[in-house]
Image (cartoon, helix red, strand yellow):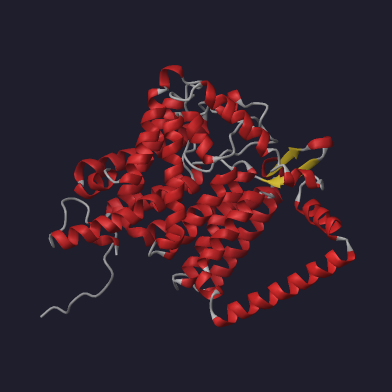
Amino acid sequence: MQAPDFSPPKMSLLAISLWALIVLVVVFGPLDVSSGAPKMTVGLDSKVAIKLLISGIAGLLGAYGLVTSAAVRQTMSTLPALGISIILLLVGLATPIAISNTSLPTTLINFGNLLFVVTALLTLKLHRVGLAILAGVAITALISLSLWYFVPAYGVFPELLAGGLVVERLSGTAHPNAVGRAMVLGLVLSLYYYRMQTLSILPAVCLAAMFALAAYLTLSRTAMVAGIAGLLVLYLDRIFTRTGVLVASLMLVVGLGGLASLYLAGTEDQLVGKVLSKISKTGDAEEITSGTGRSQIWTKAISLIKNRPVIGHGFSAAPTLMIDHSQATHNSVLHATLAAGVVGGVMMLGLMLWCVYLTTASDSLLIRCTAALVVIASLAEDAVLETFPGPITTIFLVCCIYPVIVRTKDQNKDANDAPPNGLLVRDLV
């Protein structure tokens, strides 16, 4: 009599392909190794050709999942997936009057990526999808830091600020803001998998230190704040223990005492000015109070939206229309609205509110902490629905889609114990 086999199930060829493609999407999506600080442009070269190949294969696997799996089709009919699809449909309708001829390809790439992420979640489970994203951002960190230290011509982004001041920021694989977002995502994921005992302490510490160093060198304040938000949610249960509350209370008492003494001495204005000047790149407190120029950028974006409120300007319009305003809307809702019109902006706002809800309501700690990171990153950056989806867009789709997959799975289990055709929803847990 043959002994029963208790070894974990092996990954199928489809699962291995999906896992590897997630890594490639995360690494190559934002990849733009260049010297200096070039303008944002999209042209057909070897890098773009590789991205198109990866996006094409991912889209084909997503389409395969849609055709063969009832679970994928059912997931695509849920509200979050429909919201994303509506945004992309509206951008597609703007194609005849789109500012950039890359708008339609970008739309198709993002829709293919949506199908790909849904298929990957149903095949790999959330745990493995998160590990693939972690592997991708780890590769990005290694490349970026290597270029920063050994090939600074490609690893250093010289940002020209007011008064002719040049600030050196880590880039290497993409714009420093994009690299910064990837690094804080890697930091949150590495500590999450340490908490889940998937990573032992040594690799977790090494990964966390690498991500923290790279994030700091990018000087991306939005990314750092987003990372802090993700970490706070990740360790919220530890913060609200008896010890955590005691430490927080002591810190609050000390802080309030210090502030009271400053107010009594009449030096509070000097302190505020010094703090703001320290966290600004130029040393000027006005840089922080003005949102590093975000208010002017948002005003310009809103004025452009008013010109086409129903049919938007299409994807990749900002690099042309906002060439004197940082070439981006610097807000994910405005980004969707500029591309797809007001209805598309409302859809994106709804998706962001869904992510806000998930930060406290999701049963998955991974979803809670990464949803918080995505929301904060999206407040001041075009963090999602990029030309070629990268790590933040991927985790955004995961956060939006995974909770409804779990809900659908529970409903199907209650209605019928038999699994759906194609990919098995029960494999998620």
* 290 vs 159, nearest the viewer: 290
Q: Residue furthest front?
A: 264
- Residue at 63% x, 60% y: name it: 212
- Quadrant showing the C terminus: bottom left
- How far across and how far down the image is residue 260, in percent? 80, 69
Residue 119 or 301: which is nearer the viewer?
Answer: 301
Q: Residue furthest left?
A: 1
Q: Quadrant of residue 91?
A: top left
Q: Position of residue 115 (x, y in %)?
A: 32, 42
Q: Residue at (52%, 28%) from the top-left corner?
A: 316
Tally the marks: 0
Given residues 311 and 3, the one toward you in this image is 311
Q: Residue furthest top?
A: 96
Q: Is residue 63 left or right of residue 158?
A: left
Residue located at (25% from left, 47% from top): 72
Q: Is residue 360 left or right of residue 114?
A: right
Q: Quadrant of the N terminus?
A: bottom left
Q: Please state the horizontal and vertical placement of residue 256, each as a whole percent of the image.
A: 74, 70
Q: Where 386 falls versus 220 (above or below)?
A: above
Spot occupied by residue 336 in the image (x, y as percentages of width and height): 48, 35
Q: Residue at x 74, y 70 (%)?
A: 255
User: In the rendered view, would you say 38 is above or below 26?
Assistant: above
Q: Does residue 394 appear anywhere in the picture?
A: no
Residue 310 in sight from this viewpoint: yes
Left or right? Give the position of 43 relative to 125.
Answer: right
